[in-house]
Each structure stands twice: as structure tokens, then as C-alpha cells.
């Protein structure tokens, strides 16, 4: 959309190079929503699965956006965030997770790590490791065993 706007301006001034449009990457779009009750239930089930009952859950909207898993795994946003260099205490797990939060992913903070999550169109919960682009149904041991909070997108 922005690339098209630049092209329209460029054409009025005498031309538009394809590189202007190519530089603008499309944002991943939701494929629908699930209601807050289902989203909350899924998170509570996820907490029960990992043996945790202490996490805070923040669901900001009545309808929570859902995304296509294949689109998420191939998204420009995830590739862009994972390409950033890890620097301890300056650009570490919380910084990666914060950069991905709000694009299509919620934010999770465990007792050991910060990462992201999303729901797909089948109302399945997926963990996202923003540093490696790994998407999985299970929290890995090194990522923590107790969730401090979820903030949905």
C-alpha cells in the first residue's frame, strides 16, 4: 500500500522504479477471530498442560485475532526479527519477543524466557521462538516451566 503510494507519486513525477514497491513488505493479515472466552479457555488448558496455575492472562479485546500457521512461519516480520543479532543484556529474549509482539503475536514471559504465541484458524495455540523462528505446540524445558503472563494480540 505504501509502496503503491510512492509509485503513484513517482509516476506523477516521471516514473516509478520496481524497487520502490519491492522494498515494502506486506504485513501478515488475520484470517478471522475467536472470542475472548475461547481464547481464555485455550490459555488455561495450555497452563494446565505445563502444570502451571499462576500465570496472569491479559486479553485486550473481545475478539482475538487468529492467523494461518503457514503464513506466520513464512512471514517477513518473523524473518526480520529473527535476523537481528543476539547481544546479551542489550538485545536478548525480551527484546526479540517485544519486537514481534503486536505484529501478529502475543507476548509470553516465563520464569526463564520471553517468547511469543498466536492462535491459528483451528483455535490451536502455538508458541513462537522469535530468535529461531521455531513454531511449536509445546514449551521446551529451557524456555521455562512457569508462565508469568500472557498478553494476547
Image (cartoon, grey):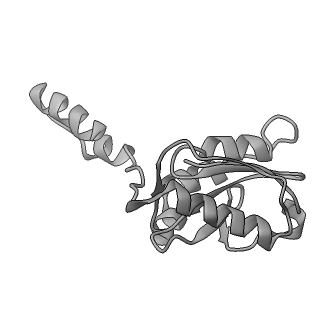
Q: Residue at x 73, y 53 (%)?
A: 115
In the rendered picture of this protein, how many numbered marks are placed on residues?
A: 0
Establish if 125 lies above or below 6. below
Q: Is residue 66 left or right of residue 126?
A: left
Question: Which residue extends farthest top?
Answer: 13
Q: Is residue 78 left or right of residue 24?
A: right
Question: Which residue extends farthest front?
Answer: 37
Q: Residue at x 40, y 57 (%)?
A: 30
* Nearer-the-camera pick, 1 or 144: 144
Tell me residue 48's x, y (percent).
78, 69
Q: Is residue 133 visible?
A: no
Q: Is residue 24 visible?
A: yes
Establish if 40 lies above or below 57. below
Q: Residue at x 41, y 49 (%)?
A: 27
Q: Is residue 120 left or right of residue 106?
A: left
Query: Could you say which quadrant of the image residue 87 lies in?
Result: top right
* Nearer-the-camera pick, 63 or 107: 63
Establish if 142 lies above or below 103. below
Tell me residue 54's x, y (percent).
84, 53
Q: Is residue 107 left or right of residue 86?
A: left
Tell me residue 1's x, y (percent).
27, 41
Tell me residue 25's x, y (percent).
40, 48
Q: Residue at x 31, y 40 (%)?
A: 20
Amino acid at each position: 500500500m505504501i509502496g503503491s503510494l510512492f509509485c503513484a507519486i513517482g509516476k506523477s513525477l516521471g516514473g516509478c522504479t520496481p524497487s520502490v514497491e519491492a522494498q515494502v513488505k506486506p504485513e501478515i493479515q488475520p484470517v478471522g477471530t475467536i472470542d475472548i472466552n475461547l481464547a481464555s479457555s485455550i490459555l488455561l488448558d495450555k497452563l494446565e498442560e505445563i502444570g502451571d496455575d499462576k500465570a496472569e492472562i491479559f486479553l485486550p479485546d473481545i475478539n482475538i485475532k487468529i492467523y494461518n500457521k503457514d503464513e506466520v512461519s513464512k512471514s517477513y516480520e518473523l524473518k526480520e526479527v529473527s535476523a537481528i543479532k543476539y547481544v546479551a543484556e542489550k538485545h536478548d529474549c525480551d527484546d526479540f519477543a517485544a519486537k514481534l509482539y503486536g505484529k501478529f503475536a502475543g507476548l509470553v514471559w516465563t520464569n526463564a524466557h520471553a517468547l511469543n504465541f498466536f492462535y491459528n484458524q483451528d483455535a490451536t495455540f502455538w508458541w513462537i521462538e522469535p530468535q529461531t523462528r521455531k513454531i511449536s505446540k509445546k514449551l521446551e524445558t529451557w524456555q521455562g516451566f512457569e508462565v508469568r503472563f500472557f498478553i494476547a494480540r
